[in-house]
Amino acid sequence: MESTIIIEDLFDQLRLAGMAQHWQGMLQTRSLHQISVPEALQVLLESELLHRQQRKVVRLNKAAQFRYAATMAEITYLQHRGLDKNTLSVLAGGAYINDGNAVLITGPTGSGKSYVASALGNHACTQGHKVSYHNMQKLLQRFTLARADGSILSLLDKISRHHVLILDDFGLKPLDKQQRLDLLDIIEDRHQRCATIMVSQLPVESWYDVIGESTVADAILDRLIHTAYRIELKGESMRKNSNIVRL
């Protein structure tokens, strides 16, 4: 009994919450006496590893600030919406993240663009990737403020460190000169190194006009489009019949 108390105290001091929880379960079911010491140690260590992985995913999700608490498993594939299950399956594998490819999600209002982007981001978190979700206009406003207080380089560096960057509602307003240069900086930092998911109501063919200034637009789109995965959603708004947009 005394040794059990000491072990539990050591779990607490070493912050081994996963091991402590499984230890209690083993004591209650008396399974501890049915396996060898190496087997018990392996079970406890695996429990601690799983606990830490789960906590990491929770932290990553919280930090990402997704628009929707969406998962890949919750996506319903309706044929008339233009969502290809094979494409989502490939993206779920995560190779696009390691390869630094872009994912371009377009479609009308309410078609589920942000939900799909959130699901992809959530799945990336479960794979251990750092993800950041931003409304495009709000991010550009942050850039303006950062430039004013001298923290612009720090903000750019922070964004570049995320394995997946999701830019939602791109193209609601044409970009001014500084905004298009800021976007170029973001895309240039991530090109072939980290994944960028762009979400827009406008078809990709219209992005050139939104960005403006042909030289910068060419530079941005050249880095985004050629190796990108495209998801082009169709149909009427799904918000008419549901409080949560799903596909």
Image (cartoon, rainbow, N blue to C red):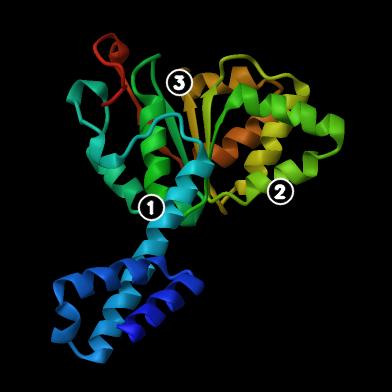
Q: Report crowding for label 2: few under 14, some 14 to 19, many 20 or more residues within 10 A (C-alpha).
A: few
Q: CA distance from mark 2 to mark 3?
A: 29 Å
Q: Secondary structure at mark 1?
A: helix
Residue under the point 64% across and 48% down: 160
Q: Residues within 10 Å of mark 3 (few under 14, many from 20)?
A: some
Residue 77 position, x and y percent, is 20, 31
For label 1, the residue is 126
Mark 1 or mark 2: whose residue is earlier in sequence = 1
In the rendered structure, which amino acid carries the disc numbered 2? Answer: Asp
Give coordinates of residue 6: x percent, y percent. Answer: 41, 81
Residue 48 horizontal side relative to residue 214, left or right: left
For residue 173, which numbered disc appears in the image? none
2 or 3: tag closer to the N-terminus: 2
Tell me the quarter of the image containing the N terminus: bottom left
Q: Is residue 131 above or below residue 171?
A: below
Q: Which quarter of the rendering shows the C terminus?
A: top left
- Quarter of the image for residue 80 reads top left
Kindly identify which numbered label has been placed on residue 203: 3
Residue that label 2 marks: 157
